[in-house]
Amino acid sequence: AKAVEKPLLDKIETDFNRSTDELKARLVDKLFILVNGKTSQGVKDYLNVDVIPKGSKFTLKQLQEIDFLNINPNKWTTDKKKNDSIKQLLHNYIIKYKEIDGVFKRKKYNITIGDELPAGIVRLAKVYIAKKRKVKVGDKMAGRHGNKGIVARIVRKEDMPFLEDGTPVDIVLNPLGVPSRMNLGQIYETVLGWAGQKLGLQFSTPIFDGATIDQITEYTERAKLPRYGKTYLYDGGSGERFDQPATVGVIYMLKLGHMVDDKMHARSIGPYSLITQQPLGGKAQFGGQRFGEMEVWALEAFGAAHILQEILTIKSDDVIGRAKAYESIVKGEPMPQPGIPESLNVLLHELRGLGLSVILD
């Protein structure tokens, strides 16, 4: 198997190198047309190391030696239009490179992993179905600091709060999610991310040894941004300025696999647990909605005593009450008084198992 694998792997690697070399050559040709005869404004990589020093003329040899995957696309020349074109060129190059790299990795994986087929099966077809879904209210999102949450509201771009220069923010997070959890990393990331975007830099901060507030402040000052990222926002609806400044910046947010479309579920009657006699949980089991402590408090606050009593008894684990309620509904009679929930009997049996004799009066 190894003898068969090697020539195949060599071939796909050769194809990959040829494709990436051709792609880079096309990029260099187009870049050279844009920068030929121009003076460098200090081309740097993402670690802020000079690649083409400031003041030197661009040459074809210099461009051919650059690793364009790690290059800062900002401020190559003094010409703003040319800089925008260079930025777009590099962006397109990275997208195309990733496509070629993805194909190469898939082919390599298929050859090295191979097909582990069960005995007696000659050919196996696997079909993966992908669905594209836009983020909607109820979907779950998260940052990189355990700051997960549910999308509460989606509004038009025009209605979002905006910065003094008119830039609308993309997402508004609840500040109450920070103090109790004490995950200040999300605030640090917000401010440092904004500075990085302005300066065209990428930051990598190790765990337990991240950037200090002084280091972040140094970069915000270089980027001419407000200290701690605090700036005034304006109401997208009225255009009025908010009273207090808000922390603004750039963070990495991702959409999690918990989507509201998959969680949509309703039940009238369904299966019950054999021991507790309470409805099963979860969509897969066609279960009921859990009515927890906090939900009980909500109904108590409203004074909805009868609804609460029904939820905790006949809609849950009062077996006799369930049967009587059904009879009353069929006969059109008033609902009966609820009985003893089965969970009490379960508790009594557990106490008896501990050697405690419990007698109810």
Image: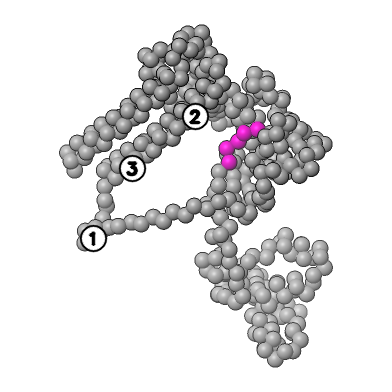
Which is nearer the eye, 56 or 2?
56
Residue 154 appears in view: yes
Q: Relative to 72, is 167 above or below?
A: below
The three-letter code of the residue at mark 1 reads Ile
Q: Earlier in the sequence, mark 1 or mark 2?
A: 2
How far apart are the two marked residues, 3 and 2, measured between alpha carbons?
A: 27 Å
The three-letter code of the residue at mark 2 reads Gln
Q: Say the numbered circle drawn on residue 156.
A: none
Q: Name the residue: 73% across, 80% down.
A: 338
Q: Name the residue: 18% across, 41% down.
A: 4
How far apart are the two marked residues, 1 and 2, measured between alpha carbons?
A: 50 Å
Q: Are marks 3 and 1 in contact (CB under 8 Å)?
A: no
Hey, which quadrant is residue 138 in on the image? bottom right
Q: Say the numbered circle drawn on residue 121.
A: 1
Which is nearer the eye, 101 or 162?
162
Q: Nearer the viewer, mark 3 or mark 2?
A: 2
Q: Which residue is mark 2?
A: 88
In the rendered structure, which segment of residues is drawn in magenta?
249-253
Q: Relative to 352, is 40 above or below?
A: above
Q: Are marks 3 and 2 in contact (CB under 8 Å)?
A: no
Quadrant holding the C terminus: bottom right
The three-letter code of the residue at mark 3 reads Arg
